[in-house]
Image (cartoon, rainbow, N blue to C red):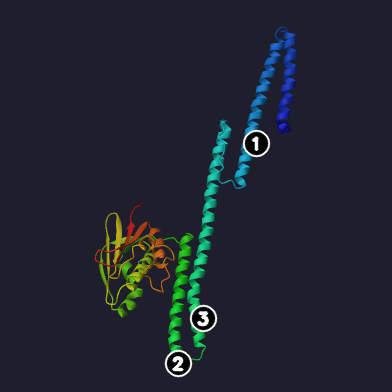
């Protein structure tokens, strides 16, 4: 029996045998009429001790086997309930360790899956403009006139700008996914935020004869640069879906609970089936243009939610799409 391979238990057995022999001898000499009863009591005590030790040994062996099963990948294995005080404490500590290890393993598996998906998405999204670049370069190599060369050069500049923006946006998403970004916490006037967000679009909107109508007051608490990126992506989405001569309406205000930014365009609105998926990564809506990539709004959501904020999109009763951003001053 494995039980008797324990050196400590063997030593205890020898001690019990010696003590039983000595005690029985003393009982025979001191009380000849009671020595048999004394001998039986010693045997009962020894038997109970070794029974308890054997039981504990078996429970330890069972606990060891269950831990070994968990270490070899049992997903749903639950450790048995142990009545012994020390074993119960040990079981609880092992269960805590198992839960933490499984949580860590799930996080690592999720990180690997997200990284694999991100790499696949990057590869897919870069393939389209790169293919267009190859075709344009091949056309330029065909010996067309200077007019054709100029047209191809303009197309090349557009494609390179698109690839540059795409790579930059994907890197930002990857850094946000990996938790590498630490948003600054500072009070920023909403007017300053909207000015910074609108700067890159002043010329494109002017060329389209589009107007920006602002009604701003108050401030918000967060990261100016990253939040301007988020708001700018929404503004870009809006003015690209507006007709020439349209107006982009932006209202920003602050109250005791949150700072709110409403961005409304005068476009055709958002298709009903697109609303639940609008902020999903690489999702292209029904009315999206051929140049749409589908990461701008996803990046905006990551930035806003990363600063204790919310973002939602809907159709305005007067027409067009409306985006609502809220930055809460407390935990929500």
Residue 309 seen from this side = yes
The image shows residue 52, relative to residue 270, as above or below, that is above
Q: Quadrant of residue 313?
A: bottom left
In the image, is 243 to the left or to the right of 23? left
Disc 3 secondary structure class: helix
Q: Residue at x 63, y 35 (%)?
A: 60
Q: Are marks 3 and 2 in contact (CB under 8 Å)?
A: no
Q: Position of residue 170 (x, y in %)?
A: 47, 67
| Callout 3 crowding tier (Cα within 10 Å): few <14, some 14–19, many ≥20 | few
| Callout 1 crowding tier (Cα within 10 Å): few <14, some 14–19, many ≥20 | few
Residue 146, disc: 2
Disc 1 secondary structure class: helix
In the picture, the quarter occupied by the N terminus is top right
Q: Residue at x 73, y 13 (%)?
A: 26
Residue wearing tag 1: 61
In the image, is 297 to the left or to the right of 131? left
| Callout 2 crowding tier (Cα within 10 Å): few <14, some 14–19, many ≥20 | few
- Identify which residue, 12 or 44, lies in the foreground: 44
The image shows residue 158, relative to residue 6, as above or below, that is below
The image shows residue 49, relative to residue 244, as above or below, that is above
Q: Position of residue 66 (x, y in %)?
A: 61, 40
Q: Residue at x 52, y 59 (%)?
A: 113
Disc 2 secondary structure class: helix
N-terminal-most mark, 3 or 2: 3
- Identify which residue, 77 or 103, lies in the foreground: 77
Q: Nearer the viewer, mark 1 or mark 2?
A: 2
Q: Position of residue 142 (x, y in %)?
A: 51, 89
Q: Quadrant of residue 233?
A: bottom left
Residue wearing tag 3: 134
Q: Nearer the viewer, mark 1 or mark 3?
A: 3
Q: How far is disc 1 from disc 2 in space, using C-alphas?
A: 85 Å
Residue 196 seen from this side = no
């Amino acid at each position: 029996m494995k039980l008797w391979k324990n050196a400590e238990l063997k030593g205890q057995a020898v001690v019990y045998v010696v003590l039983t022999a000595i005690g029985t001898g003393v009982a025979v000499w001191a009380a000849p009429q009671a020595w048999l009863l004394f001998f039986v009591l010693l045997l009962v005590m020894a038997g109970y001790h070794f029974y308890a030790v054997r039981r504990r040994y078996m429970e330890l062996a069972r606990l060891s086997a269950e831990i070994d099963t968990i270490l070899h990948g049992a997903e749903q294995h639950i450790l048995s309930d142990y009545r012994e005080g020390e074993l119960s404490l040990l079981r609880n500590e092992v269960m805590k360790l198992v839960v933490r290890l499984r949580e860590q393993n799930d996080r690592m598996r999720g990180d690997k899956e997200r990284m694999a998906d991100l790499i696949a998405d990057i590869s897919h999204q870069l393939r389209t403009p790169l293919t267009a670049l190859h075709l344009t370069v091949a056309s330029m190599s065909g010996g067309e006139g200077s007019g054709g060369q100029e047209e191809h050069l303009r197309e090349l500049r557009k494609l390179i700008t698109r690839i540059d923006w795409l790579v930059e946006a994907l890197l930002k998403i990857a850094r946000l996914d990996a938790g590498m970004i630490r948003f600054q916490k500072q009070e920023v006037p909403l007017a300053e935020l909207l000015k910074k967000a609108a700067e890159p679009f002043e010329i494109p909107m002017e060329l389209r004869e589009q107007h920006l109508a602002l009604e701003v007051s108050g401030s918000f608490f967060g990261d100016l640069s990253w939040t301007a990126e988020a708001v700018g992506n929404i503004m870009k989405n809006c003015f690209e879906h507006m007709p020439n001569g349209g107006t982009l309406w932006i209202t920003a205000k602050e109250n005791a609970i949150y700072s709110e930014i409403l961005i409304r365009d005068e476009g055709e609105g958002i298709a009903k089936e697109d609303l639940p998926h609008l902020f999903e990564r690489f999702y292209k809506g029904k009315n999206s243009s051929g140049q749409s990539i589908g990461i701008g709004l996803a990046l905006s959501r990551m930035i806003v939610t990363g600063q204790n904020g919310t973002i939602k999109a809907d159709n305005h009763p007067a027409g067009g799409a409306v985006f609502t951003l809220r930055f809460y001053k407390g935990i929500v």
